[in-house]
Amino acid sequence: MRSAGTVFSLRWQPCRTFSRVIPCKLGAVTTRTLIKNLAAASDGETSVSGWVDTVRDQKKVQFVVLRDESGAVQLVHPRSFNEDGTPAEDPLAEIISGLAQGTFLTASGELKHDERVKLGGVEIKLAAIEIAAEAIPETPIAEDTSVDKRMDWRFLDLRVPRNNLIFRIQTTLEHAWRTYWVENDFIEVHTPKLMASASESKAELFEVDYFDTKAYLAQSPQFFKQMAQSAGFGKIFEIAPSFRADPSFTSRHATEFTMVDSEISWISSHEDVMNLHEELMVAGFQAVKDKHGDEIEKLFGIEMTVPTRPFPRIPLAEAKQIVSDRGYTVPRADADMDPEGERQIAAYVKETFDHDFVFLTDYAASIRPFYHMRHADDAGLTNSYDLVFNGVEISTGAQREHRVDVLEAQIRDKGMDPEELDFYLDFFRYGVPPHGGFGMGLGRVLMLLLGLPNLREATYLFRGPTRLTP
Amino acid sequence: MRSAGTVFSLRWQPCRTFSRVIPCKLGAVTTRTLIKNLAAASDGETSVSGWVDTVRDQKKVQFVVLRDESGAVQLVHPRSFNEDGTPAEDPLAEIISGLAQGTFLTASGELKHDERVKLGGVEIKLAAIEIAAEAIPETPIAEDTSVDKRMDWRFLDLRVPRNNLIFRIQTTLEHAWRTYWVENDFIEVHTPKLMASASESKAELFEVDYFDTKAYLAQSPQFFKQMAQSAGFGKIFEIAPSFRADPSFTSRHATEFTMVDSEISWISSHEDVMNLHEELMVAGFQAVKDKHGDEIEKLFGIEMTVPTRPFPRIPLAEAKQIVSDRGYTVPRADADMDPEGERQIAAYVKETFDHDFVFLTDYAASIRPFYHMRHADDAGLTNSYDLVFNGVEISTGAQREHRVDVLEAQIRDKGMDPEELDFYLDFFRYGVPPHGGFGMGLGRVLMLLLGLPNLREATYLFRGPTRLTP
């Protein structure tokens, strides 16, 4: 392998040769031309930087498809010949012949618009190639490689335009949500992930050696979101990692995942939370459709739709009856739904209301955490919901119980000891407004939006019971 | 204590009484009036919700200062008297007399503008009070309580307007940064916090029981930010928790803290990273000044300034000379600066250039991590910088070494084993563009911007060697 240093040279001129404190360069951070901007550029000298996608090394002419994060372009180099027709000395041709897929380089040459070029209607006639870093010629994964092996080589897997698009969509989605929150005076919080006790359940808890004691990784920001209400923050949001020591290997579970959380004060019921939730989903999906709708159709074959409000709402007991009427009996002893039941109710909602979302509401208190508020007229039911999107649960929301005496009773009711939750109960003893919120799995939203087969594809670097690398 | 339930009643009407799937309420998520909007509202019926700040229970009239996340307003209730001058029956007066500080309630009555009222020029003549949750009358902390005890009662501490403002500023700052990134086509990543090995140093590493093996908490997203460059993401950002098992108790260290990270491809040197960094700081500070400048002046006595570009840059060796010329010799055997040295160089920069920021550049390779690129003409120095703000280091940035053979040599040079970093080296073996970036402590920026005495004040819930609660 040729050392990259022989071709790539550091172009930086140290500032201290000019002046001690004034920078030698200002303005745009970097000056390279993105490939997506070539079509709108004029013919003439240009330079692009990216990695080698393919090389077609023909007798008379060489083609390189170069890719960057914005697109791909064809580089072309007609070989040189002597007058007698024998190959002439051609150092550029030799470099091109030696290019491995994945090699990063800067190509300069002449941009030409030519509508016969299928790839974007432009090509660059090469003048020079500056190699930044050569790749090992062998590529360990291909399109049909198993998902587990692709995850071993995730950095190569993410070079595939379809996979890159997932994370550009994620960026747009999150920014639309945050913009909604910020424009509506929500405060962003960063709640601690190291805790002295469990936040959800003592099962599925990761234990950390913490100096002379033990800490636990936060399973959700639940307690700290609620603390913000007692602190008078009013409305808050957080997008952050959560951790569950869940040994399951389903397509929709991970040990570490990104949670989207929001919590608001002075609600009348979980209806207010669902309204917030709807507004966020509409704002996010509208932004994704506007920015990426065409690409999503091209790379995923999905016509992106923005959900209409209101989203259908069905009390869980009725949803189970509807599913049962369709011939599926949920095989559970408790009052809960199961994944097939969620698919069935989603199919019913799609057929009946042409909607991809459904709120299942009023879950039984027996299958909800102690902090969900119960109905005023029926303590067996809670002011809570799950949001189902394309047949899979993506979120749980609820009004929280804010009356400390009722809350303590509900803790006991679950067989838990209020003493252990004393620090949490303090939030309520010193005053707290009625409040509620939801937590939503970011990866699940992306998975279901794009029809991905599992959460791994929607996660930058997946973590599961047997997956801690790369 | 009266049960809150006797006064507060759940106002929600269950949707299922109207229709199975159509919500009973739409539109704005909640309808309460924020206190900050009262001044612009017309006189007449109004209702506000918040917590009791103070009660002045006088013979003829009662005053309550009610606070919400947006401000404070005076509620007034003239007591009733019989014709003979004796106190008349007055249930509202009794409720007011019993109000504890921190009790959350909804107050309705008549809004009146009156310029004699110092608090915002308005007051509400009370008609009714609806208590949401009563507070315990004893308040465990006061303004002069020690910081450690205030942290025990952080949810009460955060009710103080000054402390609330810190997190509204944080929200604005982060949103301005993210808006800059998104508008410049950066991709947001969520890198894993559970790792199979150390990301920075084997010291200060938290160990996690991970099923049948061990995992470690990420000390920084360093490796995964760089992976994004090999994956062709081009430009990325992340704001997320980092963890350091650092046993120190200084004012500027925490075991868990929020890191602001960005990494970009195709840079020429760390100058490009510093340019990006400057643009972000200017965008963030401008947004904070625009939105909170007046409040910052009022509550912190600080006139917010937006830094001018370029920020001064001083090579570290020269900075040490300047500091030495000022009479302070850095008491370190290695080439590094110390906190007092940082304060001294910041003072020099303030005096000489009237600037609050300074980039210290070109750190010696001996005191930088293996992944910093070294100077092309002097392997003893790196293409790196620290950003110092108001005398304290808030960030480290660098161009990364992307040439795998050089990188392996630098790993060995640090006495480390390249075998252990094999998964990381793979990112480079399969091609990577020249790249660089920075990591910055969010809490430090806020601490220094607002002149706070320590990181605890700038952190929602601080985590230190002996602090895991609340």
Image (cartoon, coloured by chain):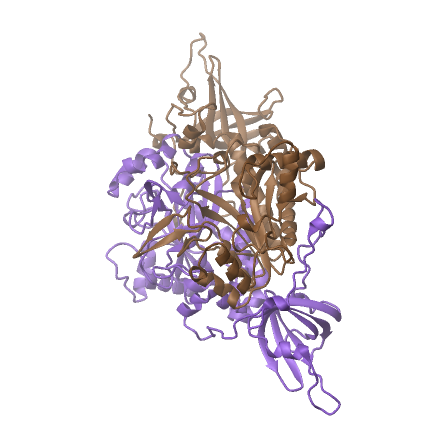
Chain colours: A brown, B purple
**Relative vertical location of residue A185 with respect to residue A278 in this rendering, above or below:** below
**Relative vertical location of residue B393 with respect to residue B138 in this rendering, above or below:** above
Question: Of residues B340 and B231, which is closer to you in this image?
Answer: B231
Which quarter of the rendering shows the N terminus of chain B?
bottom right
Residue that lies at the very extreme toward the front in this rendered image: A333
Which quarter of the rendering shows the C terminus of chain B?
bottom left
In the picture, residue B375 is in which quadrant? top left
Residue B56 point in image, percent of width and height: 60, 81
**Relative vertical location of residue B416 with respect to residue A214 in this rendering, above or below:** above
Q: Decide if residue A130 is in sight here.
A: no
**Relative vertical location of residue A126 with respect to residue B220 in this rendering, above or below:** above
Q: Decide if residue A364 is in sight here.
A: yes
Question: Of residues A411 and A210, which is closer to you in this image?
Answer: A411
Question: Of residues B324 and B54, which is closer to you in this image?
Answer: B54
Residue that lies at the very extreme toward the bottom in this rendered image: B84
- Residue, x 64% and y 79% (percent of image)? B94
- Please state if A322 lies on the left or on the right of B225 as rendered: right
- Please state if B236 lies on the left or on the right of B222 as rendered: right
Question: Of residues B183 and A261, which is closer to you in this image?
Answer: A261
Image mark count: 0
Residue A290 point in image, percent of width and height: 65, 39
Residue B191 point in image, percent of width and height: 44, 43
- Residue, x 63% and y 49% (percent of image)? A274
Residue A441 point in image, percent of width and height: 53, 43
